[in-house]
Amino acid sequence: MTRNNGIQVLLLALAATALRGEGNSIRLDGGPSWKGLSIRFEPKLEPDPGGASRDLGGTVIDKGVHGDVGQRFIDDPAHKRTFGYDVELIPSNNALTAEIRIQPLHDAQHAVENGWTQFGLPAKLPKYPVITGLRVGDTVAIDLMVNPSTGQKIVDYLTLVREQAQPVHDFSLADVELSLDRPRLLVNGKPLAEGPPDAASGPVIWIYVTARGRFSLSLLPNAKLGFQKNGTATGNILTFRDGAMEFRVECKSPVAPSPGPYNLYVLHETEWRPRNQGMQFTLAAFGSGDKVTEPVIELHFEPAR
């Protein structure tokens, strides 16, 4: 992680996205070509010695190098190793069945350079199967590692699921979102990080700063969750403070639905730490603004030069 005046930053944003988490699982939607189908991933250690599977982390990158190919990464902190593979879903014409193709990871070094793997170059899988004739609800097991002397193995379980249509509802204040379009972070006026060439939007934005904890930002007051008025959103800029330190997020387009200025509400969690503190900088998206949860998609970017 790059340092600037002793500060390390993890920048995150909550947004509606095709990638969602459920417990220790994470789900990938491949867009229109997947015809409303998704894959839910859940890594497990078998046999599980006292819940060790909860320590297995990872992510899925939905910007595959071959169009709709996802890239799956699973971290094994106990042994400091990462596994990775490409995954492609090919639905039938009527989308009642699908084929899942597991393939070697394309450009593994690129994954390391962008921080998608926690423990260096991802290890190869014992095999790369093609599974045909899957129906919604079917689950397949992908062996990541097998220890022949102990019989213990790490398995990634892939379940074919179908996206549920969101019900039509009236527009409300809860639908108002912040937007980060190619964000640039400054601390006390000094550039600290620049985001990816993408935009993310949602009701809440996270910013994690080493030794200062996590700041969750919203345009709406939410006293029940502990948000307090601390900053402004004006035009393309968010600003808020922590004591004598001023944080400023500059974006390429407006951060709110209209120019403002608006009050910014902040929830500060001084003791919060990311699960993976070895990342450089991360812009992440979330599925819900009702609570502050773990990230379910990560788009990585390079530190400011």
Image (tube, rainbow, N blue to C red):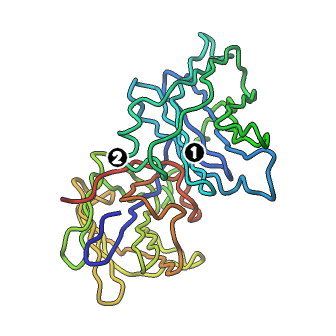
Residue at point 68%, 29% (across, down): 160
The numbered disc on residue 148 is none
Residue at point 40%, 41% (across, down): 111
Of the 4 image quadrants, the one containing the C terminus is bottom left
Amino acid at circle 2: Glu
In the picture shown, does residue 57 fall above or below 101? below
Give x and y (percent) for residue 201: 40, 53
In the picture shown, does residue 243 fall above or below 301? below
* Badge 1: residue crowd in 10 Å (few <14, some 14–19, many ≥20): many
* Badge 2: residue crowd in 10 Å (few <14, some 14–19, many ≥20): some
Residue at point 29%, 70% (across, down): 3
Q: For numbered disc 2, what is the local secondary structure? A: helix
Of the 4 image quadrants, the one containing the N terminus is bottom left
Give x and y (percent) for residue 240: 33, 77
**Nearest to the observer: residue 297 or residue 117:** 117
Residue carrying label 1: 74
Q: Residue furthest top?
A: 93
In the picture shown, does residue 131 fall above or below 214? above
Amino acid at circle 1: Ile
Q: For numbered disc 1, what is the local secondary structure? A: strand
**Distance between the alpha carbons at the discs numbered 2 and 1:** 16 Å
Q: Is residue 137 left or right of residue 9?
A: right
Residue at point 41%, 81% (across, down): 229
Q: Residue furthest bottom?
A: 243
Instruction: Count every numbered label the image shows and give the total.
Output: 2
Q: Is residue 249 left or right of residue 50?
A: left
In the picture shown, does residue 44 fall above or below 243? above
Residue carrying label 2: 113
Give x and y (percent) for residue 167: 62, 41
Q: Which numbered disc, 2 or 1, marks the residue that appears first in the sequence?
A: 1
**Nearest to the observer: residue 27 or residue 140:** 140
